Image (cartoon, coloured by chain):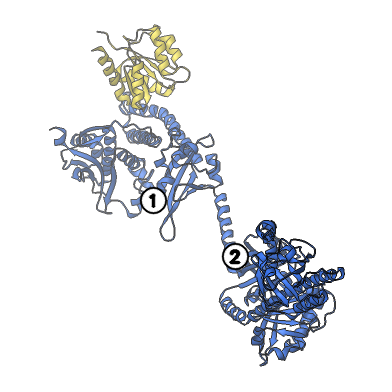
Amino acid sequence: MELPQADPASTLSMTPVRELSRLAALLRYEILDTPEESAFDDFTELAARLCETPIALISLVDDRRQWFKSRVGLEVSETPREISFCTYTILGEEIFEVPDALQDPRFCHNPLVVGDPHIRFYAGTPLTSPDGYNLGTLCVIDREPRRLSAEQRDTLERLGRQVIRLFEQHLLAHRYAEQAALQQAMLDSASSAVLVTRPDGVVTSVNPTAERMLGHSEQELVGHQLTSALFRREALQRRATLLSNELQTPIEPDFAVLTAPLHRGRREMSEWRLRHRSGADVPVLVGVTAIHDEQEELRGYLVNAYDLAYQEQLQLRLQQIAAQVPGMLFQFHWRPDGASCFPYVSEGVEQIYGLSPGQLAGSFAPIIARVYALDRSALLGSIREAAAELAPWHIEHRVEHPRKGLIWVEARATPLQQVDGSVLWHGFVTDITVRKAEQLELERQQEMNRRLLEALSEAVIACDADGCLTLFNEKAKQWHGTDVAPVPPDEWPTRYQLYHPDGVTLLRPEEIPLLRALHGEHVCDHEMVLLGQGEPRHVLSNADPLYTSDGQPMGAVAVLHDITERKRIERLQREFISTVSHELRTPLTSITGALGLICSNVMGEVPEAMHELLDIAQQNSQRLNALIDDLLDMDKLHAGKMRFALLRQPLQPQLELALRSNRNYAEQHGVVLQLGTCPAVTVEIDAMRLQQVLSNLLSNAAKFSPAGEQVELSATLSDGRVRISVRDRGPGISADFRERVFQKFAQADSSDSRQQGGTGLGLAISKELIERMGGQIGFESEPGHGACFWFELPSEGLAKESP
Amino acid sequence: MAELRRILHVEDDPSIQAVTKLALEAIGGYQVLSCSSGAQALEEVEAFAPDFILLDVMMPGMDGPQTLLNLRERVDLERIPVTFMTAKVQPGEIEHLRKLGARDVIIKPFDPMQLAEQIRAIWLADRY
């Protein structure tokens, strides 16, 4: 009899994806190849009995075989999937029944049918997981053809569902075991002490770290109240009081101290000192977690205790370091709700606020109370601002220190945002009273200097070492018509209207006194004109370089003195002298003319008795003329109106001319003029002015020589200059007159002018004239041994002139 | 060759006027007409027909240089030398006065004994 071959690959397949998911579901139960279990065997025994079959199996189908978790009446533990009946069962959702395998073309050639165990009858119900996958079957087998009754089918299905439930339980048990092992491992290896309690605080388990940290074995702690076993009564009492205030409800000094904050939604860590079995204190940080079951029922607490001994060491080290730091170090905690505290403050807080670290344990308020009232709002504002922006914080404020009085302190800190939104600050505060006093004193001095500069009637200008203008005082701004601006020195003359004394020519930058001083020069009384305000302002500028205390250049300063008014008065004086001189000359011309005519007897013989008086009148009118001439010369020299017709010429003829011109005058005084040596040189001079000087010196010498003496005019050469000397044998120059010899209207004493008939301007004019011609004038004298007046001029040898 | 006889003197200061007149008349023997202003000089110059004119520079109203220019309208100044008398001045100013047509400049204060001789020297220098 030909029956079709069973072919699972072509006729018994589900979609590959679904089959893969089914296999994954089967593997998840982790039941394949596990040992026999009586719980499963009960079901196969029951199935065989109720269905009245010799064989019953719990069969699980994987990718290549069916494996029997439990079997009754069969020796083999698995068979290939291709020949299994169960492969058909798991394709459907109901019982799969084969009444007579030999009559069924799918199974008539099956080795299990034609050979051992000679199956004729098969009925299996699929084992369907809660997520809908058929993992295998609960099946019954007989060696005789038959059918199950309706009751038996129903029983088989019910048993199948029970088997799946058993699978589920098996899986859960497996998971629990794993989790329990994991938890134990975690507890055992935790670096913190972990103590588990019941809701009432009685210890149910502790981990090895707890045993090690506290010196108690698990047995010694389990069954005891946690707080009474390990916590100190006083500490519990203190904490209870604190919490009662904070939470506004009475808290008992027992286990509630640890759990109360938790039930108000605050998960916090608190520091404690636990009792070691030896009696010693163990510093710990304690955190408490509530354990709830699936129904949200409180099952107990997990108490974690972190060893702080190491932290305490660090704390001690910090304390020792902080003690070396002037001022105070702190850590400050600022909560969004405004509450704040100092987790750490160094002992230096006494130096700053006159408080001990203990006084700041709970509150920031004691510090605020010490801050000077006027500085409080600024201080709090700056903290809020820095916390909001998380920017480094820096503020100076005053403190009313109980011991030191009012002091200035400086605080700096850096805020760090915490996960809970609070801000943690690390910083320090130092006493800056001394520095502040110095700073205030410095500011006061600077203010004083500033006011001083503004009060000056002089203009003050300064620049730094780079030539940048740094200061115009009030007068400087006013006179320049502008304030300092960052312009290069090249532009100063135009920007600040700096002119030569003529008021027309702009100063060149290198002529500006301030710049000259910047280059190290000491500038004294440099005259210039400022046109910044329109009207020319004549000023004298004095400028000096400025150096730091160690000699480094730091700039220059110039002080301008207004001489406009002085110049105006001088000009008026000169105009007055000039006018008066001219006006005097007219009547004098008539007087001298008239006297000249009378004395010459042209108008008739003058009586002998009148001669002396007429001579006096004539001499004095001539003296007045000379005085007026001198005044006008002086005026011209000062006004710069004296013109010099400089011409290079031999010196000797000039000396000879001077001798001739003054011989008569000398003879009147009974004095002889002599020419001494004269080198063959030329000088560049205005001959008329040179004669004026020589006349002045010769007539002075003649005037002051005793009758019968000689006056010698001579010249000597040295270093390219010729010195012309006039030597007399008069009384010489007295010591107290030496300094004034070349001053205007200077005469040895007031009687001299009358006695000797000088104007007092001769030497002053001579000095000016010689200097204008590039020379120098001076004298040597010993009282009682005559005087030698000399002047030097640049000269050249005659030979060069006439090769 | 003409003789120097008549000198016209223009000077606003009466004292100088008097001393000058005296010095020129008494020592030089000249005939002097003194005028107190340039205007008077212009009125009198043709009638007086001077051989020489002596002019003060600073005068109220018409000053010396202006008088010189006006005189030129009336008389032949090529034939009549004009000399200024002035207080000590700068060399440049003397140059300026010469350019105006002055033969020379006599500086005040002058020596009355020398004045007549000075003027004669100028007059003669002009002749040759």
Q: CA distance from mark 1 to mark 2?
A: 36 Å
Tag shown at residue A69: none
Measured along the vertical axis of the image, is residue A426 above or below residue A616? below
Residue A642 can be seen, yes or no: yes
Q: Colour of chain B?
A: yellow
Q: Which is nearer the eye, B79 or A586?
A: B79
Q: Position of residue A141 (x, y in %)?
A: 75, 72
1 and 2 marks in contact (CB < 8 Å): no
Given the image, on which type of amino acid does mark 1 rest?
Answer: Gly
In the rendered image, which residue does mark 2 sit on? A436
Q: SS at mark 2?
A: helix
Q: Position of residue A696 (x, y in %)?
A: 29, 39
Measured along the vertical axis of the image, is residue A595 above or below residue A715? above
Q: Between tags 1 and 2, which lies in front?
A: 2
In this rendering, would A715 be left or right of A430? left
Instruction: Give the quarter of the figure containing the C terminus of chain A.
Output: top left
Instruction: Give the quarter of the figure containing the N terminus of chain A.
Output: bottom right
Quadrant location of residue A271?
bottom right
Point out the residue furthest to the bottom here. Answer: A278
Quadrant location of residue A275?
bottom right
Given the image, on which type of amino acid does mark 2 rest?
Answer: Lys
In this rendering, would A745 be left or right of A214? left
Q: Which is nearer the eye, A415 or A216?
A: A216
Same chain for mark 1 and mark 2? The answer is yes
Q: Position of residue A459 (x, y in %)?
A: 51, 46
Q: Residue at x 36, y 24 (%)?
A: B93
Q: Which is nearer the eye, A114 or A71?
A: A114
> What subunit carries mark 1?
A
In the rendered image, which residue does mark 1 sit on? A520
Measured along the vertical axis of the image, is residue A575 above or below residue A238? above
Q: Position of residue A411 (x, y in %)?
A: 63, 66
